[in-house]
Image (cartoon, helix red, strand yellow):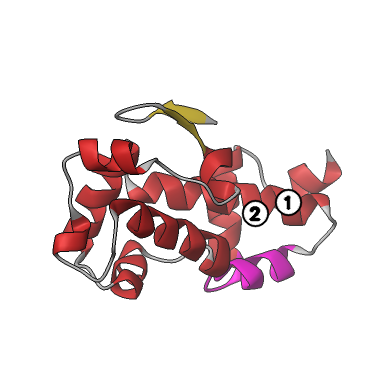
Amino acid sequence: MEFLGKYRKITVDDVWCGSSVTEAEAAAAGKHINKYRNYATNNDFIDHFAALLRIIGYRPLYRYAASMGVGRQEFHHAVLALTGWPPKKWIDEFTLRRIREYMEKGRSSFGVAHSLGFVDTATFSHYFHRHFGMSLREWMDG
C-alpha cells in the first residue's frame, strides 16, 4: 500500500521498517510540532508515532495522542500534514498488516485479538470482516 505524501511518495513499508519523512520534507509540511511539545524535530514526532504503531497496535486515536503528549486534534492535523494520511488510516494499515502476519503464522483469532488490543474476539471479528470482506472462518478455510 502506498500513498502520495505531501512531498514524496511514502509507503507503509517505509514506516513499518522504522523510516519516515526526511527533515526537509517535515519542515516543508509547515507543521512545527517541536515548538509545542518535547520533540526535537518533526521527524521525531512521526518516528514516535510509528514506534507506537509497532508496539501497542490497535487502540483508539486519543490513546496515541495522549501517549505522545498532544491533543487529539493537534495529533490528527500533525500526522496528516506530515504524512498525507490521517492517523486512523495509519492505525488501520498497521493493524491489518499485523493481523495478516499473525494469521499466516497460524495464531488463533483469540490470540490475535488479544495481542492487538481488541476488547474481545467479537470486536476483532467485526473489524476483520469489515476490512477483509470475509469472516474469520472463511479466511481460515480459504
Residue 72 appears in which quarter of the rendering? bottom left
Q: Is the Cβ of the residue at disc 2 closer than 8 Å to that at disc 1?
A: yes
Q: Nearer the viewer, residue 139 or 101?
A: 101
Asked whether, in this view, residue 34 is left or right of residue 22, the answer is left
Under mark 2, the amino acid is Arg
- Residue 113 drawn in magenta: yes
> In the structure shown, which secondary structural element does the residue marked by tag 2 occupy?
helix
Residue wearing tag 2: 98
Work out whether 38 lies above or below 47.
below
Q: Nearer the viewer, residue 70 or 132?
A: 70
| Magenta highlight range | 109-121
Would you say residue 5 sits in the magenta stretch? no
- Which of the 4 image quarters holds residue 29? top left
Give amino acid for label 1: Glu
Which quarter of the figure has residue 65?
bottom left
Above or below: residue 10 compared with residue 30:
above
Judge by depth and name the residue closer to the eye, 81 or 101.
81
Q: Secondary structure at mark 1?
A: helix
Where residue 44 appears, as percent x and y from the top left, is 37, 58
Where residue 43 sits in the image (x, y, percent)?
36, 52
39 lies left or right of 20: left
Find residue 9 and name its label: none
Residue that badge 1 annotates = 101
Image spot of residue 84 (x, y percent): 32, 35
Image x and y of residue 139, in percent: 76, 43
Please tell me how crowded label 2 is: few (under 14), some (14-19), or many (20+) other residues with Cα within 10 Å: some
